Amino acid sequence: METIIIDAYNLMHKVPEMQLLLKQSQDICVDTMIQKLHGHYFGKGYKVILVFDGYGKNKHEQNIEVKFSKTDIGYDYGHADALIKHLVEKARNPKLVKVISSDRDVTFYAKECGAKIQTAETFWGEIKERRTERNEAFREENEKPSVISRNEYDFLLKEFTKK
């Protein structure tokens, strides 16, 4: 199973769509990000970890985990970069880890450990592109029925053969 570790605040500040949501509310931005990632990665053999700076309560929802660098229990990492580095370091197989961040220090460390890296902007661009493709395919699929009933066939036959 591939693990995707996302520098969440980095993503929120680098992607225009997320910046707009962040201006409304951080909670709305985080919930939207989780919803879109869940829709994209659910049931596809990926574990997604959103890593945040600061204090918060870690949570786990199906294939998506939300981790904070400071919690009531466990080690205090101080900031998200240290927690991301720790997660990469403790991975059994770093080749199955992808780190999403535009922070050079984080991506350099991840790459040195053997993990894959991707900038926040290109990652979210791919998510958005795939979502658009799925929506278009869904629209096309619902535009024309793939199967019609015998009654529908008889009705259409009568309608189009009338003179």
Image: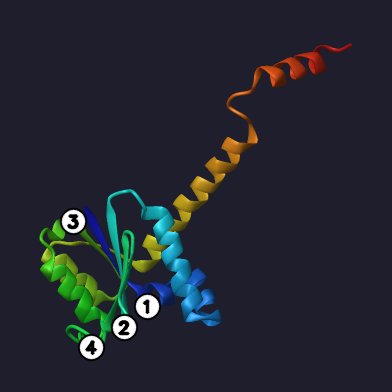
Q: Earlier in the sequence, mark 4 or mark 3?
A: 4
Give me the C-alpha separation between circle 2 and circle 3.
24 Å
Q: Nearer the viewer, residue 63 or 128?
A: 63
Tag 3: amino acid: Leu
Q: Nearer the viewer, residue 52 or 133?
A: 52
Q: Which mark is residue 53?
A: 2
Q: Earlier in the sequence, mark 1 or mark 2?
A: 1
Tag 4: amino acid: Gly
Quarter location, residue 41 = bottom left
Q: Are marks 2 and 3 in contact (CB under 8 Å)?
A: no
Say above or below: 137 vs 47: above
Q: Which mark is residue 96?
A: 3
Q: Which residue is mark 1?
A: 9
Question: Which residue is at a point 30% across and 76% down the rendered structure image?
Answer: 58
Q: Earlier in the sequence, mark 4 or mark 1?
A: 1
Q: Earlier in the sequence, mark 4 or mark 2?
A: 2
Give me the C-alpha separation between circle 4 and circle 3.
26 Å
For discs 4 and 1, the disc positioned in front in the rendered view: 4
Callout 1: helix, strand or loop?
A: helix
Q: Which mark is residue 1?
A: none
- The x and y percentages for residue 13 are 42, 77
Q: Earlier in the sequence, mark 2 or mark 3?
A: 2
Give me the C-alpha separation between circle 1 and circle 2.
7 Å
